[in-house]
Amino acid sequence: MTRIHLPGPLAEGLVLDLPDAAFRHLVPVLRLREGDRFIAFDGRGGEYAAELVGVGKRAARARIGAHDPVSRESPLDLRLAQCVSKGERMDYTLQKAVELGVTRITPLLAERSVVRLDELRWTKKLDHWRGVIVSACEQSGRTRIPELDPPQPLNAWLAAGVHGSGVVLDPAAANGLSALPAPAGALTLLAGAEGGLSAGELAAATRAGFIGLRLGPRVLRTETAAVALLAALQARYGDWV
């Protein structure tokens, strides 16, 4: 059944006007009509049975039904610190990271980042990324929306020390995945953009407590690297076993 994210908090018996994006998806695209049912979630956990109770040409209303406390969240608290890549590459990374259970995403600007925007365009980019994240949650069955931080310079983020324990992807690192123990708490994955991280940035990450990690003998593209590591961690320590 179709799953739609609705801004919360939701509660059984609530009747609300659908946001424009939800209306467009349910009515013009899927052609749902009054009385049709769907699943709604507000990102705070679980999901709700819902029903369209009024459908017009440009708007619709829905009644929220019983709450199902189902959870499809990963037992691992994996956080992605991804240096911003261009266009669809970043969208792909965000979408797949959400599908793979990441709980927080921090976009970073590094020396070799090619995306440079003014404040207004960054605001629009963040809105777009939130849409990508929510859509991935709708499709994958997730019941909680990962947090999305505003873009920030890599070195400033490292200096702030807010990342906890982490690994930095480095094709020349001495350690492979077998050297990484099961995460005991939150684990942050730091991945570079096109061209990777500079030697100085890798050194700064090491000083900040990150462990260098290589993913086999091949160099992976920016949109592939973090996604591959997330999948490997879910297979080894998460809920794929």
Image (cartoon, rainbow, N blue to C red):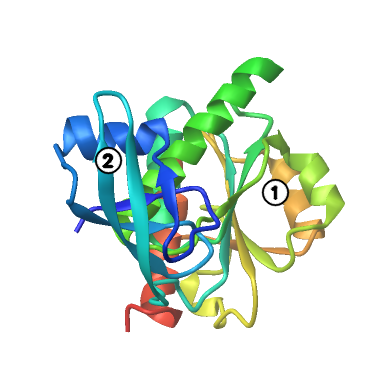
Question: Quadrant location of residue 64?
Answer: bottom left
Q: Amino acid at mark 1?
A: Leu
**Residue drawn 46% across the image and 41% down it:** 222
CB atoms of marks 2 and 1 within 8 Å? no
Tell me if residue 194 comes above or below residue 231 in the rendering: above
Q: Give the position of the C terminus as an image quadrant.
A: bottom left
Q: Give the position of the N terminus as an image quadrant.
A: bottom left
Tell me if residue 235 comes above or below residue 188 in the rendering: below
The residue identified by callout 1 is 202
The residue identified by callout 2 is 54
Q: Amino acid at mark 2?
A: Gly
Question: Quadrant location of residue 164?
Answer: bottom right
Q: Is residue 217 visible?
A: no
Alpha carbon distance from label 2 to label 1: 56 Å
Left or right of residue 2: residue 203: right
Identify the mark at residue 129; answer none if there is no mark.
none
Left or right of residue 109: residue 182: left
Q: Residue 99: percent from the left, percent from the top?
A: 37, 57
Q: Residue 167: percent from the left, percent from the top?
A: 62, 63
Q: Residue 142: percent from the left, percent from the top?
A: 39, 63
Q: Residue 125: percent from the left, percent from the top?
A: 54, 26
Left or right of residue 122: residue 145: left
Q: Secondary structure at mark 1?
A: helix
Which marked residue is nearer to the observer: mark 2 or mark 1? 2
Q: Who is closer to the viewer here, 162 or 139?
A: 139
- Crowding at label 1, few (<14), some or many (≥20) Cα neighbours within 10 Å? many
Q: Who is closer to the viewer here, 36 or 105?
A: 36
Tell me if residue 45 comes above or below residue 192 in the rendering: below
Left or right of residue 18: residue 10: right
- Crowding at label 2, few (<14), some or many (≥20) Cα neighbours within 10 Å? some
**Residue drawn 70% across the image and 42% down it:** 199
